[in-house]
Image (cartoon, helix red, strand yellow):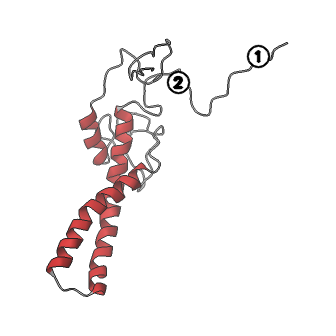
Amino acid sequence: MTIVSHHGPSQDGTNQFPDRLPGKADRALAPSLRRGFLCRCPNCGRGRLFGRFLKTVPSCATCGEIMDHHRADDAPPYFTMLLVGHITIPVILAVQMRTTLSDMAFLAICLPLSGFLALALLQPIKGATVALQWALRMHGFGDNSTEMTEFAEPPETIEPH
């Protein structure tokens, strides 16, 4: 059985996580998440994180931190749906049990409320996701200048003679 360490080299001497090199200062997770949820730069907390609704800025205008590295992908919509569902379902059940609204009136209230809540939470949750990646030095947010990217050329293969 191989034990993989999240810091430094593995048992065979290779570094499994190049962004998490020994000697790098840890980035505070809680302040970074708070700054990201407030749609601010996770590094300085002053610069804007988004240029448009869900489009991150290329870099922070205040501190210069590059934001193009993030790979939020499907995580923010997933977490938004999870959170909106956990908020609205108990409210929907409580209202339905205590009132005698018609089905159409009930839908006219609940659907816009759920949609508004989802739109209101999507950008802050994406900001927190980007901030999490920044704090954990994921996807190029580390200080490693020799980091390989997924688009790097593969090493040349030596053909046997």
Most extreme residue toward the right, as rendered? Answer: 161
Judging by the rendered image, the residue that carries numbered circle 1 is: 158
**The N terminus, quarter of image:** top left
Where's residue 46, x and y in %?
Answer: 29, 40
Which residue is located at x 32 percent, y 74 percent? 112
Which residue is located at x 22 percent, y 72 percent? 93
In the displayed structure image, the side of residue 4 where residue 110 appears, left or right: left
Q: Nearer the viewer, residue 150 or 158?
A: 158
Three-letter code, disc 2: Glu
Most extreme residue toward the left, as rendered? Answer: 98
Q: Against 138, is 81 above or below?
A: below
In the displayed structure image, the side of residue 6 where residue 139 appears, left or right: right
**The C terminus, quarter of image:** top right
Q: Nearer the viewer, residue 65 or 104?
A: 104
Judging by the rendered image, the residue that carries numbered circle 2 is: 147
Which secondary structure lies at badge 1? Answer: loop
Where's residue 141, x and y in %?
Answer: 43, 31
Where's residue 52, x and y in %?
Answer: 42, 55
Three-letter code, disc 1: Ile
Residue 48 visible to the viewer: no
Q: Quick one: label 1 or label 2, which is nearer the N terminus?
A: 2
Give the class, few, some or many, for how many residues have Cα within 10 Å of label 2's Cα (few <14, many ≥20). few
| Label 1 to label 2: alpha-carbon separation | 23 Å
User: Does the residue at mark 1 contact the one at mark 2 (Cβ under 8 Å)?
Assistant: no
